[in-house]
Amino acid sequence: MKKPTLQQYYEEVVRKKLCEGGRYANVHEVPAIEKIVVNSAISADAEKTWAEEVAREIGLIVGQQPVVIRARKSISNFKLRAGIPNGVKVTLRGRKMYEFLFRLLSVALPRIRDFRGLSTRFDGHGNYTFGLQEHSIFPEINVDRERRAIGMDISFVTTAHTNEEAMELLSLMGVPFVRRATGSAEGRAA
């Protein structure tokens, strides 16, 4: 079975570029994307069938059946009762992870209106999370049907030890980060 395009790109190009500086003594020390986690929250006052609909839609997008997360205890201020579905999550590894990442970077993100890039805020341990407000940017979703928007958080868990290593890894993989303006204000005005 042939490897996904992005996995081949990582192994043949990205890994070599990361090794060039001599920072890593062994090829296994080079940072890699370990897994991608996709989460979507469900409102407590949503209809009973909404959790199934969200799970089905997220499953179409990622290509793997998600897990429906249920509330463990009741919280009256949030109108939450124990056992009611309040989220959906799926963890992608290996082949499915690279296929989802390829579709996300090459098809879904370019379809966002007025997209200027993703934030460069990492968690301090080499992991990166960003949110999407609309799931209809994915081509697997039929936008002709009348439906509500499903938001989701997408987390990249890497083996990088610092934010800089993770930023370099994800940039080389093709994640479109916001470009920061360099230089002083006087230099740009001229």
Image: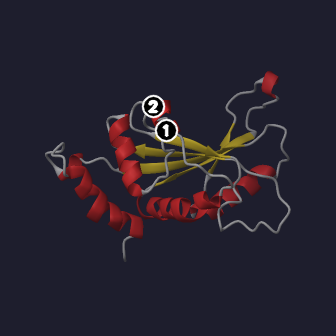
For label 2, the crowd category at 10 Å Cα-Cα, with few meaning under 14, some 14 to 19 and many 20 or more, is few
Q: Quadrant of residue 23?
A: top left
Whether residue 111 is situated above or below residue 185 in the rendered picture? below
Q: Which numbered circle lies on residue 188?
A: 1
Q: Nearer the viewer, residue 17 or 25?
A: 17
* Distance of label 1 from label 2 (alpha carbons): 7 Å
Q: From the image, which quarter does the N terminus lie in?
A: bottom left
Q: What residue sits 70% from the left and 47% below the top?
A: 133
Q: Are marks 1 and 2 in contact (CB under 8 Å)?
A: yes
Circle 2: element type: loop
Q: Which numbered tag is attached to residue 184?
A: 2
Task: Please name the amino acid that badge 1 sits on.
Answer: Arg
Which residue shows up at 40% across the image and 70% down it?
A: 5
Q: Secondary structure at mark 1?
A: helix
In the rendered structure, find residue 58 and report the number of the disc placed on it: none
Q: Residue furthest bottom?
A: 1
Task: Find residue 121 and report its horizontal and vertical position in percent.
Answer: 49, 35
> As rendered, which of 126 and 82 lies closer to the eye?
126
Find residue 167 and report its horizontal and vertical position in percent.
39, 43
**What type is the residue that disc 2 sits on?**
Ser
Q: Position of residue 63 (x, y in %)?
A: 57, 64
Q: Residue furthest front?
A: 190
* Above or below: residue 4 compared with residue 37: below
